[in-house]
Image (cartoon, coloured by chain):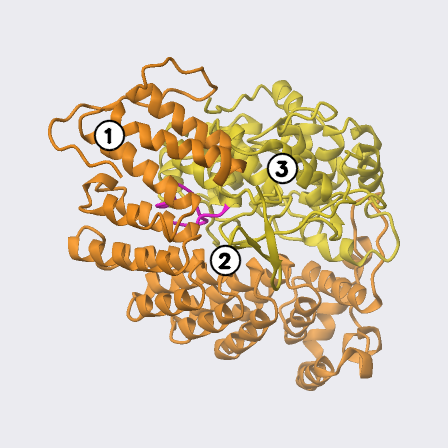
Chain colours: A yellow, B orange
């Protein structure tokens, strides 16, 4: 039983005599799923005047579009988005090197190349871009040690290993890179606690763990994961509020409902999370007035957290939402159409 | 887009002719850059040295997906930036503009790329750039681009001498800043700067014994220097960790660390560990201690003669956790309990679960550990 004795500073609560960093869900927090409001929120996103945040997020626009379209598709509302405009936009973002940028006038990057390919998969329009050149671009970013740079400037991160294989898998071109080396690098990022970081020896982090387990799923190497050890680390992310954090002693955030939950699903241990408590945390992150989800209850909403809130609920089995694929964070029916069935541990 | 192509020739002509003017331009541009927005911001459209450049409005595609509203300054800066990019202009004014753009949006990776291109093309003073990126990071320490930029400058200068001090300053504001820790690890490995790091980690753990990043760093330093295979080192680390646990028992990181460093040798091979951990149960109880005990018993029973007599207290501990001490993870504790029962038997058939059966252990003769 939870005995909340005292609230100290800054989200540190005393629980059974020990300090726990967490949030308290207020009794009047939303507890039903407001799908229509979320669909309206996304459909209208960016069309408001004076939207300073929309402007400032131009540097990630391709990912922003992917988040919006994916959550709309999961809610069965994809038709409300402007397919033709978006496809034209993507065509304008492919550079001569084959890579795709976040927006027009920005430089190409693996992150936005993946987002673009995901969007085109949703729309079954992969061939509007030069697929061969995308493959060349991705191949060209692989380093000698098997890792992938994000772009020509050379930042190395396991996120980019995931972006590379996910992109190529969606294009049916996984065989074009040095798979053994790519796997070797990702495995070299496995830590003493069973988790993964962005580079070898980097602290385990749920976002990186999602990328690495997703990578190992796509490349058929999930047997290399210590599923019990990692599963334990992942289910330790759940706090008394029901929400999930990204690493020890951090606050819960609804996007970790995706990174942690999808990872657990991939390694076959999603039932180690208290689903009911997580569901009530996610629902509490909704904004009843504006629609959308925030990182935690009461904060400002955005499309990023809206996608991961809805996707998390889908993984938890909500029948009002389409099944989501835990590796690609895309609707299962899209992946079936593409013919992709990445491994999951049972 | 076509409007930019039309003016690109006039722009090139102006630059060739105005060599002298260019110098003044730089000074003026810098002065204006320093003026506060509220007080005396002079829009580029009003600056004569920018008169040749036609701003390129943001283009989200032939039919913009959405309408955009800017504050005026933001709009002009980024429109100017796009114009420079289109013309591939490599000039001081372009360099000054990247600073303005960064101030408005330090996450815009294309602006950082362009700045790096200019740093090289204009052969800029990299020491000055270090000062610049230091200030930016201090202001916005949780941004991928700024840290990557700093790394590039350090590489170009081949000078890591300020790095550990700088990262320590950033960590003093947020001891878990993920980017800061990555940078620190890179500097240390690249330039072999291992001295004093263990002491630094201990300082951080004194301040916050639950700092997971610091525990990770501890593992990083030791793995890359002495390693853990020396039994004296391992002993030191085990005792250090147990000491921290006594100070703050509910400490996930410390327990993960203890488990992690003993994995290779096997938990049960460390002499006296069971006794030491069992002793802690009264004063330092936590789900992590119990989880550790469970792992320890599992390892013992695996290595030594398997016997359900020894799995019984562990199964009891799992039940305690599932039903009382750590109910949110009851499914995990039930899984562990079932695994133990399946492997070592309690005499009763166990209800099936969605979990896979655990690997069977090999039998070893001899020593039986005492019950707790």
Q: Give the labeled residue for mark 2.
A: B178
Labels 2 and 1 share a subunit = yes
Compute the Cα span from label 2 to label 3. 25 Å
Mark 2: secondary structure: helix
Q: Please name the predominant secondary structure of the magenta segment in the image.
A: loop
Report the side of B277 relative to A5 (left or right): left
* Depth order, front residue of A32/B215: A32
Q: Is residue A196 magenta?
A: yes
Instruction: Check the picture and name the quadrant holding the N terminus of chain A.
Output: top right
| Chain label for disc 3 | A
Q: Residue at horizontal 68%, vertical 63%?
A: B105
Compute the Cα span from label 2 to label 1. 39 Å
Q: Position of residue A273 (x, y in %)?
A: 54, 34
> From this viewpoint, which residue is outermost toward the left?
B366
Q: Is residue A133 magenta?
A: no
Q: Which mark is residue A278?
A: 3
* Depth order, front residue of B312/A233: B312
């Amino acid at each position: 039983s939870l005995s909340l004795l005292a609230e100290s500073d800054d989200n540190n609560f005393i629980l059974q005599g020990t300090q726990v960093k967490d949030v308290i869900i207020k009794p009047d927090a939303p507890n039903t799923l407001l799908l229509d409001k979320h669909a309206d929120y996304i459909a209208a996103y960016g069309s408001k005047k004076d939207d300073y945040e929309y402007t400032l997020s131009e540097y990630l626009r391709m990912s922003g579009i992917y988040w919006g379209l994916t959550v709309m598709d999961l809610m069965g509302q994809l038709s409300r988005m402007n397919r033709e405009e978006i496809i034209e936009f993507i065509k304008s973002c492919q550079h001569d090197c084959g890579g795709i940028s976040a927006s027009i006038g920005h430089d190409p990057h693996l992150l936005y190349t993946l987002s673009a390919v995901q969007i085109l998969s949703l729309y079954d329009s992969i061939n509007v871009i030069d697929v061969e050149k995308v493959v060349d671009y991705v191949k060209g970013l692989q380093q000698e040690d098997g890792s992938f740079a994000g772009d020509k400037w050379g930042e190395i991160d396991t996120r980019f290993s995931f972006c590379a294989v996910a992109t190529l898998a969606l294009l049916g071109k996984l065989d074009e890179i040095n798979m053994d080396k790519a796997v070797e690098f990702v495995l070299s990022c496995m830590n003493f606690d069973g988790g993964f970081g962005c580079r070898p020896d980097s602290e385990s982090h749920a976002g990186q763990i999602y990328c690495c387990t997703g990578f190992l799923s796509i490349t058929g190497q999930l047997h290399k994961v210590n599923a019990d050890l990692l599963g334990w680390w992942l289910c330790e992310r759940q706090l008394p509020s029901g929400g999930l954090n990204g690493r020890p002693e951090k606050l819960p955030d609804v996007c970790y409902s995706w990174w942690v939950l999808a990872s657990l699903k991939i390694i076959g241990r999603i039932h180690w999370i208290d689903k009911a408590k997580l569901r009530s945390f996610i629902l509490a992150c909704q904004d009843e007035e504006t629609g959308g989800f925030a990182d935690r209850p009461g904060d400002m909403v955005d499309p990023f957290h809206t996608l991961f809130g809805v996707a998390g609920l889908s993984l938890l089995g909500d029948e009002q939402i389409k099944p989501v694929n835990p590796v690609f964070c895309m609707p299962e029916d899209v992946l079936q159409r593409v013919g992709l069935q990445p491994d999951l541990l049972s | 887009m076509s409007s930019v192509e039309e003016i690109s020739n006039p722009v090139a002509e102006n630059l060739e002719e105005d060599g002298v003017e260019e110098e003044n331009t730089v000074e003026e541009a810098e002065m204006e850059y320093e003026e506060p927005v509220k007080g005396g911001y002079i829009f580029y459209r009003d600056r004569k040295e920018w008169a040749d450049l036609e701003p390129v409005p943001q283009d989200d595609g032939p039919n913009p997906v959405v309408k955009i509203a800017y504050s005026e300054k933001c709009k002009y800066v980024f429109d100017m930036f796009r114009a420079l990019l289109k013309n591939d202009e490599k000039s001081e004014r372009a360099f000054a503009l990247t600073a303005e753009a960064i101030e408005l949006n330090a996450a815009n990776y294309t602006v950082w790329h362009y700045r790096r291109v200019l740093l090289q093309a204009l052969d800029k003073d990299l020491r000055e750039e270090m000062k610049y990126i230091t200030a930016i990071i201090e202001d916005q320490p949780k941004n991928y681009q700024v840290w990557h930029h700093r790394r590039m400058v350090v590489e170009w200068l081949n000078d890591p001498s300020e790095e550990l001090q700088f990262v320590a300053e950033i960590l003093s504001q947020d001891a878990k800043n993920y980017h800061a820790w990555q940078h620190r690890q890179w500097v240390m490995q690249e330039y072999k700067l291992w001295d004093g790091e263990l002491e630094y980690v201990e300082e951080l753990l004194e301040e916050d014994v639950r700092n997971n990043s610091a525990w990770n760093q501890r593992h990083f330093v030791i793995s890359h220097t002495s390693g853990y295979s020396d039994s004296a080192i391992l002993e030191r680390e085990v005792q250090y960790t147990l000491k921290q646990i006594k100070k703050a028992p509910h400490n996930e990181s410390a327990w993960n660390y203890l488990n992690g460093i003993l994995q290779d040798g096997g938990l049960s091979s460390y002499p006296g560990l069971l006794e030491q951990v069992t002793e802690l149960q009264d004063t330092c109880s936590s789900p992590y201690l119990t989880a550790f005990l469970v792992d320890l018993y599992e390892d013992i029973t695996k290595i030594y003669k398997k016997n359900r007599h020894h799995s019984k207290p562990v199964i009891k501990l799992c039940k305690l956790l599932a039903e009382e001490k750590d109910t949110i993870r009851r499914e995990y504790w039930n899984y562990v309990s079932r695994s133990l029962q399946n492997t070592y038997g309690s005499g009763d058939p166990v209800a099936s679960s969605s979990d896979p059966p655990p690997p069977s252990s090999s039998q070893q003769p001899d020593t039986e550990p005492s019950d707790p």
